[in-house]
Image (tube, rainbow, N blue to C red):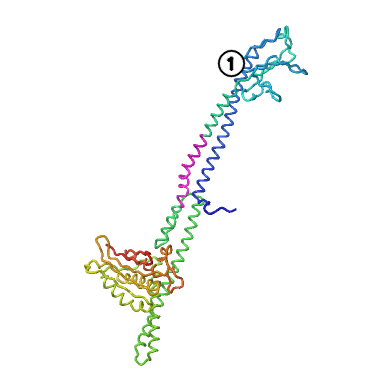
Amino acid sequence: MPFSPRWRLGLRGQLLLVFGLVLGLATLVAGSYQYRSLRRQLTHADDALLRTRAQELLSRVSLDPLPTLPLPDQRGEVMRVAFAEAGQPAHELFRSAQFPAGPGLALPPPDGPGAVLGPQHRVVAVSRPAAPPGPGADNAAATGRLTLWLGHPAAPLATALGRVQRTLLLGLAGSLVLAALLAPLVAGAVLRPLRRMAAQARRIQQAQDIAPLPVPATGDEVQELAETLNQLLARLAEQATAQANFLAAAAHELRTPLATLQTGLDVSGRDPSLPATTRAALAGHDAELARLARLVDDFLLVGRLGAGAALPARRPAVALDELVLALADRELPRFRAAGHRLIIILPDEAAPASLVVRTDPDQLTTILLNLLDNARKYGAPGTPVTLRLLASTARHGPLLEVENTLTTPLGSRLAQLTTAWYQADPLAPGTGLGLWIAGRLAQGLGLGLQLAEVGQLLVARVQGPA
C-alpha cells in the first residue's frame, strides 16, 4: 500500500530521521556490547571471589578418622561436600539445609564457571584428590576426589548488573535526546548550500538578469548539482537573450511598413470622392493597423526589457491631472466601443504641486495605457472602469488607481498577472504582456505598482515617489 502524501518526509525530515536512527542504533549496539562485557567481568569476579572462599573451606576439610568440615560462617552461604571414586556413585558428606536441590538440577563442574541454582544462589565447585574417609585418610594415597560446592546469594550480582543496565539505558536515552538536539544543526549544515541555491533561485525569479547559483566547495553531489544548475541557467539566459533580440529586431523591422500602411490608409480615408462604405472599411483597417502597431511596440518593449536593458528615462515634472485627462480623451472611444463607461475621478481643490511627479511621461503613459487596456479587455461586460487620481500626502506621493469589475474571482491567480505571457482568461484577446510591461516600466521608474482584489474589483495602484 503506497504511503499517503501527508506521511512523506522532506529532505530535512529524512536527514533528521536517519541521523537519529544511526546515532540511536550505534549507541544501542555499543551499549549492548558494553553490557555483555561488564556482565562477563562482574560474573567472573564474583565467581573468583566465591571460588577463593570455597578453596579455603576445602583446605580445612579433614577425613581422618571421620569427616570434619568447617561450616559456612558468612551470611547466606550454603555448602555441599561429596566424595567420589572412579566407577562408584558419589557419597554426600554434608549438605546445608538451604542448598538448592531438586530433580534435574545440574551442579557446576569443579573449577568450571559458576551457575545460578534456584532463584537465590550462585554456586561454584572446587575439588582435590582424597582417600575414602577413615583412619589415616588424610595421609593415605588418593583413590578419589573430594568436591565442595559453595554458594552465596545471587542478588548482589543481579543488583549490580541491573544498575549497569539502567546506566546504559540512561546513556541510550541521553544519546537519543542529544541526537534530537544535534540533528537539526547537522541537517541545517547539510542543507545550507541547498537553501542558498533556493534563495538565489527566488532572487532570479524576481530579478532582471539570471545570476549563477552559489557553488559550495564541498566536492560532493551538492556541488555537482549547483554546477549542473548553473550550466542550465546559462543556457536559459542565452535562449532568453536570443529570444529578446529576435523580438526586438522583428518589432523594429515591422514598425516602418506598418507606419507606411497606416499613413496610406489615413490619406485614402480622407478622399471625399470615396463612398461612405469604403471610408468606413478603411477606418476599420486603420484601427486594426493601429492595434497591430501597438502590439509591435509591445514586442519591442519586451525585447528591450527581456534583454535586461534599462530604458532611458527623462524626469521632467509631469502634471498627472493633465495626463489623466489626455488619456481619457484618447481612450474614451475604445471604451465606448467595448461597452464600458470610463469614469475619471480627480481630487477636489488639491494643490497643483500635490499632483505633480517627476518621471518619464512616455513610459508612465505606457503604464497607464496597459492598465486601462487590461481593464477594458477583462472587465465584466457592461461595468464601468474607473481611473482615479489621489493627491500626494506628507508620507506618500500621488496615487493613480485603475478599477474594473471581475467576471470571476482571481484568488491565487492574482500573483501571476504580472508574469510575462500569462492570461487569466486564455480565450480573451491579447498576448498577456500588458501588465508585465507595466510592472517592469514601473520598476525602472521607481514607481510602485500593486494589484489587489477588493471584493469583486481588481484594483491596480501606481504610487509615485513622496
Looking at the image, residue 121 lies above or below residue 433? above
User: Can residue 174 be found in the magenta stretch?
Assistant: yes
In the rendered image, residue 173, in percent from the top left (x then y), is placed at 51, 37
* Residue 447 within the magenta-colored segment of the rendering: no
> Which segment did they paint magenta?
170-194
Disc 1 secondary structure class: loop
Q: Quadrant of residue 328?
A: bottom left
Tell me the quarter of the image containing the C terminus. Answer: bottom left
Q: Which of 385 and 33 is in front in this view?
A: 385
Question: Between residues 282 and 312, which one lies in front from this camera angle?
Answer: 282
| Amino acid under disc 1 | Gln
> Given the current orientation, which residue lies at the most extreme bottom position?
273
Name the spot of residue 450 as percent of width and height, x first.
35, 64
Q: Name the residue under label 1.
A: 74
Give the image location of residue 99, x and y in percent.
65, 19
Left or right of residue 43, residue 413 in this image: left
